[in-house]
Each structure stands twice: as C-alpha cells, then as structure tokens.
Image (cartoon, rainbow, N blue to C red):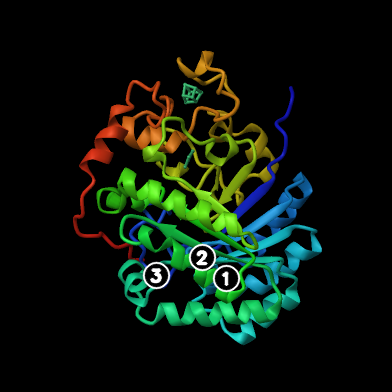
C-alpha cells in the first residue's frame, strides 16, 4: 500500500483562550476549555513525531498562543528539531521580556494580527479596549528584536476601504510582509457573514489598492480574496490531507481548523494514536484525500488536481453534505447559495465570540 506524502506544516493550536472576541473567528463553535488542553509533554511528543514524519514548519497559534506558559519551551524544541517556527499572535500579551525569551529560543517568524488601523475600528471588531496600542507596541518590539514580521489584516465590509492605510502602517512599522486577508466564513465567521461580506464594488476597490501597493515595491504582499465573489474555489488547505495537519488544544488531529463539523466520523487524538498513523491511515484524513471521493462535475473536471474540489467544510456548511461540490464553483448545483448570500448581505449587529 502506498502511503501519502508527509505533511509540510503543522498548525499547533496551543489554546482556544483569547483576550479578543472577533466576530470572524474561524475556530469551531465549541471552544475547548483550559482543563482539556494538552500538557507540555503532550505537545513535545507531538512536535517530535511531526519532525520524525518530515514536517518542515510549525505554526504556533490559538486562540492566543502567548497565553500558554510553555510557549518558549516549545519554540526551543522546534528549533532543536529543525522545524521552522512561526508564532501567530494578536500581540496583546507581548512584552520585552517574553519576546526576548522567544527570540533566544530561536523563533523564526512572527505573524502579528491587526483588526484595523484605527483604534475605534479595532475595538469594534476585537472587543478589547486598548488592544490597538498594545499591538503597535508589540510591532515595535518585534522590529527591534530582528525577528522577521508579517502584519495580518483581516478585511471585511467595515474596514476594506482602509487598505491603503494598512499598507502605510506596515511600512511605518517596518514589516517585511503584509497579509490582506478577506474574511473566510467558517466557524463563528459564518454567523456574521451578512454583516461582514463586502460588496463586489468593495472587493474590486480592495484589489485595486493591493495592485497599486504592489507596484510601489519594497513590501511583500499576500492577498486572500473572498470565496463568495469567486466562480472557482480555492484549493483549501492545499487539498484535504495532503499538506497540512491541525492540532487542537486537546490533541485532536484535523485536516483543517474547521473539520470538527464533519458528522459521523471519529476525530483521532494524538494522545491515543501515533501522529503518523493518523495521517496515513485514519478514516478522517482518507475520506476526502485525492480525487476518488469526488462527485461529478469534479470527477471529470480538468481542475480537479488544482483546487481538489474546493473546501469540504464550506460544502457541508452551505449544502449539508461535505462530499458535495464546493458551492463557490459555478458548476456546483448549489452555486446559487453563494450568489444569494452576496445579494442578501446587509449590516445586522455583529455577534461576538467570547471564550
Ligand atoms: Fe473545482 Fe470541481 Fe468546480 Fe472543477 S467542478 S472547478 S474540480 S470544484
Ligand atoms: Fe475545512 Fe476548507 S476549512 S476543508
């Protein structure tokens, strides 16, 4: 039996705890409590197994990963194992001392998230007073430390007009890279889709702003467009079970951060089963890997090994069946669910995420 190629990256969701309460949070609807979190020994074993399998990168994420007191120890272990380490953080718990410890442990990169460029916009989304000032301070500390930094801005109908100011802030703070990511509507984010989905005009304006900034040079830019204005889906996670593994705070191993909505399947846990066995043999990872599972029109489509049929979680959330064609695809029999959502989008009250 041929085994699948090993994953390239592992997302370690060290905790779901987070001081922010963003309405577009992509974590699952049911957050895992602190008492269920894996202990340090569990995370150490997971990283060791990942390196043994050939994983190249570990992304420490959450929730807010800086809420875990063992973060520095785990970063140091990643360095010992030759794993490239990236910290995905809101920055609100960062200070000179803990950043210095992370730098000494060998952290390779930090992705710092901003909710907006204005304090008012940031507090409206993140729900935490004073967060913007803490993030600006964190960015200055990171720049001074020399650790390469990416700023991440999640954009939606309320802040999409401020993309030029986001680039200006990134240049001012000395970021090497900026990610402008349109909100993806999974997990909690789907609850706020009608309030956050930008219009087509707003999307076009945001794309023009990105292109204008790219033309200036000197700043690497990643631009993630919203599925809802597309006719072809993205290759979610680079294909189910092909490049990516997600570890939840309690040690469940998933093909993507939203996969726990898939019904009638066991979610394997690294506390019960070796990581390599989960990747190679579990039902969860095998069920949508490759192309054998695909229905028509994917099965006979020449894009099937480009987008791998799109996103299984989106197919489930919008059609009730994860094995359906992603409704973003114009060839999907459910594509009108996307076009209707775009037409319906308005501005109801935001529903906040609270731990
Ligand atoms: Fe992708 Fe399937 Fe649509 Fe083809 S039919 S573009 S493989 S989702
Ligand atoms: Fe789960 Fe796309 S988020 S497959």
Q: Residue at x 43, y 26 (%)?
A: 323
Mark 2 to mark 1 CA distance (whole Å)? 6 Å
In the displayed structure, would residue 179 be above or below residue 318?
below
Left or right side of 68 for 204:
left
Q: Quadrant of residue 231?
A: top left
**Quick check: marks 3 and 1 in contact, CB under 8 Å?**
no
Between 254 and 137, the one nearer to me in the picture: 137
As drawn, the label of residue 171 is 1
What secondary structure is found at the residue carrying circle 3?
loop
Picture quarter with the N terminus: top right
Q: Residue at x 19, y 55 (%)?
A: 348
Q: Nearer the viewer, mark 3 or mark 2?
A: 2
What secondary structure is found at the residue carrying circle 1?
helix
Mark 3 to mark 1 CA distance (whole Å)? 25 Å
Between 8 and 29, the one nearer to me in the picture: 8
What secondary structure is found at the residue carrying circle 2?
helix
**Quick check: marks 2 and 1 in contact, CB under 8 Å?**
yes
Work out whether residue 205 can be spotted. yes
**Circle 2 residues within 10 Å: few <14, some 14–19, many ≥20:** many
- State the residue position of label 2: 167
Is tag 3's residue or tag 1's residue first in the polypeptide sequence?
3
Q: Position of residue 39 (x, y in %)?
A: 59, 65
Q: Position of residue 178 (x, y in %)?
A: 56, 61
Q: Residue at x 45, y 50 (%)?
A: 208
**Circle 3 residues within 10 Å: few <14, some 14–19, many ≥20:** many
Q: Residue at x 47, y 66 (%)?
A: 166
**Circle 1 residues within 10 Å: few <14, some 14–19, many ≥20:** some
Left or right side of 203 for 298:
right
Between 25 and 153, the one nearer to me in the picture: 153
- State the residue position of label 3: 20
Is tag 3's residue or tag 2's residue first in the polypeptide sequence?
3
């Amino acid at each position: 039996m041929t085994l699948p190629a090993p994953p390239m990256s592992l997302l370690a969701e060290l905790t779901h705890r987070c001081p922010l309460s963003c309405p577009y949070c992509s974590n699952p609807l049911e957050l895992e409590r602190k008492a269920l979190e894996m202990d340090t020994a569990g995370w150490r074993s997971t990283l060791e197994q990942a390196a043994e399998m050939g994983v190249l990168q570990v992304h420490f994420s959450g929730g807010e990963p800086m809420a875990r007191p063992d973060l520095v120890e785990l970063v140091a272990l990643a360095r010992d194992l030759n794993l490239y380490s990236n910290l995905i953080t809101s920055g609100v718990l960062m200070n000179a001392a803990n950043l210095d410890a992370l730098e000494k442990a060998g952290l390779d990169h930090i992705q710092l998230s901003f909710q907006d460029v204005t304090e008012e916009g940031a507090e409206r989304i993140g729900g935490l007073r004073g967060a913007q000032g803490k993030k600006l301070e964190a960015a200055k500390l990171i720049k001074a430390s020399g650790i390469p930094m990416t700023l991440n801005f999640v954009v939606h109908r309320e802040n999409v007009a401020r993309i030029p100011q986001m680039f200006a802030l990134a240049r001012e703070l000395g970021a090497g890279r900026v990610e402008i990511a349109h909100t993806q509507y999974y997990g909690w984010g789907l609850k706020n889709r009608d309030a956050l989905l930008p219009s087509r005009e707003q999307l076009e304006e945001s794309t023009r702003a990105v292109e204008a900034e790219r033309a200036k040079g000197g700043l690497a830019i990643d631009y993630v467009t919203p599925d809802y204005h597309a006719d072809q889906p993205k290759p979610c996670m680079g294909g189910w079970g092909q490049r990516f593994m997600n570890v939840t705070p309690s040690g469940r191993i998933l093909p993507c951060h939203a996969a726990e909505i898939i019904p009638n399947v066991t979610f394997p846990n690294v506390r019960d089963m070796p990581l390599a066995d989960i990747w190679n043999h579990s039902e969860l990872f095998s069920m949508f890997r490759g192309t054998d599972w695909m229905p028509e029109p994917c099965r006979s489509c020449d894009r099937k090994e480009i987008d791998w049929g799109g996103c299984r979680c989106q197919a489930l959330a919008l059609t009730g069946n994860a094995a359906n064609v992603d409704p973003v695809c114009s060839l999907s029999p459910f594509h009108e669910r996307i076009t209707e959502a775009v037409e319906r989008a308005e501005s109801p009250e935001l529903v906040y995420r609270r731990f």
